[in-house]
Amino acid sequence: MKLKGVVILLSCLAGGLAIASLGGLLFAGYRYSWGPLSSLGDIRQRNMEGNAEIYSLSNVEKLEDTKGLEGKKIGYLGSSVTYGAMSLRTSFVEYIAKRCATDYVKEAVSGTTLVNDKRNSYVSRLANFDPNDHFDLFLVQLSTNDASQNKPLGEYGTDDTHTVIGAICYIIDYVREAYGCPVAFYSNAYYESDKYAAMVETMKDISAKKSVAFIDMYSDTRFNDISEEQRDLYMADAIHPTMAGYLEWWTPISKTA
């Protein structure tokens, strides 16, 4: 009888864990478009006003003035914002390509960091780019994940890629050596985060010291001066834009790189 009771208890625990795991996968898939049930997130995202069909890539036309970008090839390195995690996998990358007739390689994985402490870090994923490829520009996302995951900022002048500064400097040097092209970084639009604000200030310093362009949407008060109605349309949450946000808000400034 005691053995039977133990078996029943273990079965109940196993069943509870299975239900909890399934619930977690359902939540992650629906809320964050992550995991084996990520398709559930598409359902949610399609119901967002900012992801309406009017903003889809199929409705975007090439610009007459491509600002000299036509025919250029751009390498993009980033995480969920570069990927388009809340906009049905369409980000400014695809809009710039469509509007300005650019070619591109997009290396973007949600949840990843600049800091090189995992196999899918920015630094590690540089190896995913073809070393024999040609780029006219390399654009890197200043990841919000380093801030939310409390990665160490580090100090300028070191080559420790386990810090934010070390990883940024490594990426700049690697791209220049491998592809001989300009490197630029871009930040998120403003959201409340002391840690990300510190990263932005650090990036400004690195930009000046290493002569790399920095598209600072975080500190640009004019850029961030939009109405609440616009913000609701343009942003799925504090960090991730919708298709409308990329197309109408972020893409015009991103082209300045």
Image (tube, rainbow, N blue to C red):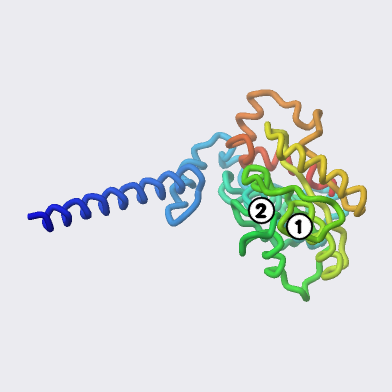
Q: Which residue is mark 2?
A: 113
Among the 4 quarters of the image, the one containing residue 175: bottom right
The secondary element bearing badge 2 is classed as loop
At which x and y percent is residue 71? 81, 62
- The amino acid sitting under disc 2 is Thr
Report if residue 120 is visible in the image: yes
- The amino acid sitting under disc 1 is Ala
Question: Which residue is nearer to you in this view: 104 or 174?
Answer: 174
Q: In the picture provided, is 102 more to the left or to the right than 84?
A: right
The residue sitting at the left extreme is 1
The secondary element bearing badge 1 is classed as helix
Tell me the residue at 51%/45% (across/down).
32
At which x and y percent is residue 85? 58, 48
Q: In the picture provided, is 36 more to the left or to the right than 140?
A: left
The numbered disc on residue 132 is none
Above or below for 227 versus 7: above
Q: Residues within 10 Å of mark 1 (few under 14, many from 20)?
A: many
Image marks 2 and 1: residues in contact by CB distance under 8 Å: yes
Report if residue 58 is visible in the image: no
Question: Which residue is nearer to you in this view: 199 or 257?
Answer: 199
Q: Which residue is mark 1?
A: 167
At which x and y percent is residue 195? 71, 39
Earlier along the polypeptide chain: callout 2 or callout 1?
2
Number of marks present in the image shown: 2
